[in-house]
């Protein structure tokens, strides 16, 4: 399998640590969508194949950012599997834990404090997953549009459109909350 193709021992160890740390939560996310334990296992394994191809994007094994990244990938792989097997009942809403957006080294640090960042993250979590996922992958995980398209198995134009819509939604939500 792909795992055996990993040349560097450091990368192999990194994947092992990621797998043992996050396989259970990824399985839970996949199972909530697919309602089948074998398909959920397939989703977790397929997710790790995508992760192996982009291992350089993960710096730390044990952090909220890595956790949310892996769960987003697993969720989309699960949806892909679901779409191939339409006879499974879909549960589109699942909680994927706390998401941490790392804004260090960005000008936004000057504009927001910790409380407003927490509010922004909560607002993003309330959005539909197709929009919150692209925002988190783009701005929290620093993935390019091409990389997001690859991970989510969608066209780059779809990623661009979802990002555009997500930004508009986020601005409208924040404006409404500021008025209230």
Image (cartoon, grey):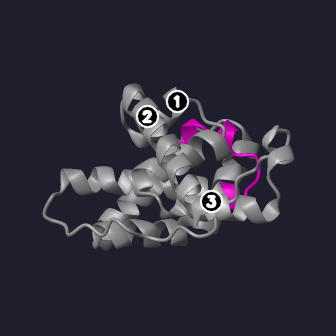
Q: In this view, does 102 lie to the left or right of 152?
A: right
Asked if 157 appears above or below 41 in the picture, the reply is: above
The front one of 177 and 156 is: 177
The front one of 137 and 162 is: 162
Callout 3 secondary element: helix
The front one of 84 and 141 is: 141
Residue 174 % position (x, y): 58, 55
Q: Mark 2 points at which residue?
A: 159
Q: Do the residues labelled 2 and 3 touch (CB within 8 Å)?
A: no
The front one of 158 and 2 is: 158
| Residue at the image position 64 percent from the left and 42 percent from the top | 139
Instruction: For marks 2 and 3, give the CA distance.
Output: 28 Å
Residue 37 % position (x, y): 33, 72
Instruction: For marks 1 and 2, give the CA distance.
Output: 6 Å
Task: Point out the frontmost of discs 3 and 1.
Answer: 3
Q: Are marks 3 and 1 in contact (CB under 8 Å)?
A: no
Asked if 42 appears above or below 171 in the picture, the reply is: below
Q: Give the range drawn in magenta.
A: 49-65
| Residue at the image position 36 percent from the left and 65 percent from the top | 40
Q: Is 51 within the magenta?
A: yes
Q: Most extreme residue toward the front, as rendered?
A: 179
Q: Name the residue under label 1.
A: 145
Residue 20 % position (x, y): 62, 66
Q: Few, some or many C-alpha atoms within 10 Å of disc 2 (few <14, some 14-19, many ≥20)?
A: many
Q: Which of marks 2 and 3 is nearer the N terminus?
A: 2
Q: Is residue 128 left or right of residue 72?
A: left
Q: Are marks 1 and 2 in contact (CB under 8 Å)?
A: yes
Residue 115 shows in the view: yes
Asked if 101 appears above or below 97 in the picture, the reply is: above
Callout 1 secondary element: helix
Callout 2 secondary element: helix
Q: Residue 177 carries which label?
A: none
């Amino acid at each position: 399998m792909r795992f055996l193709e990993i040349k560097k021992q450091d990368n192999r160890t990194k994947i092992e640590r990621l797998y043992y740390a996050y396989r259970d939560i990824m399985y839970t996310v996949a199972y909530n969508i697919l309602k089948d334990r074998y398909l959920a296992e397939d989703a977790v394994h397929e997710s790790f194949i995508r992760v192996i191809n982009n291992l350089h994007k993960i710096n730390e094994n044990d952090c909220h950012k890595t956790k949310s990244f892996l769960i987003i990938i697993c969720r989309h792989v699960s949806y892909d599997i679901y779409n191939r097997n339409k006879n499974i009942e879909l549960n589109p809403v699942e909680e994927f834990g706390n998401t941490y957006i790392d804004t260090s080294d960005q000008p936004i640090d000057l504009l927001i404090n910790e409380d407003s960042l927490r509010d922004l993250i909560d607002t993003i979590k309330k959005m539909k997953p197709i929009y919150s996922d692209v925002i988190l992958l783009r701005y929290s995980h620093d993935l390019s549009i091409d990389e997001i398209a690859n991970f989510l198995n969608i066209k780059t134009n779809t990623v661009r459109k979802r990002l555009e819509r997500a930004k508009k939604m986020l601005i409208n939500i924040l404006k409404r909350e500021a008025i209230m």
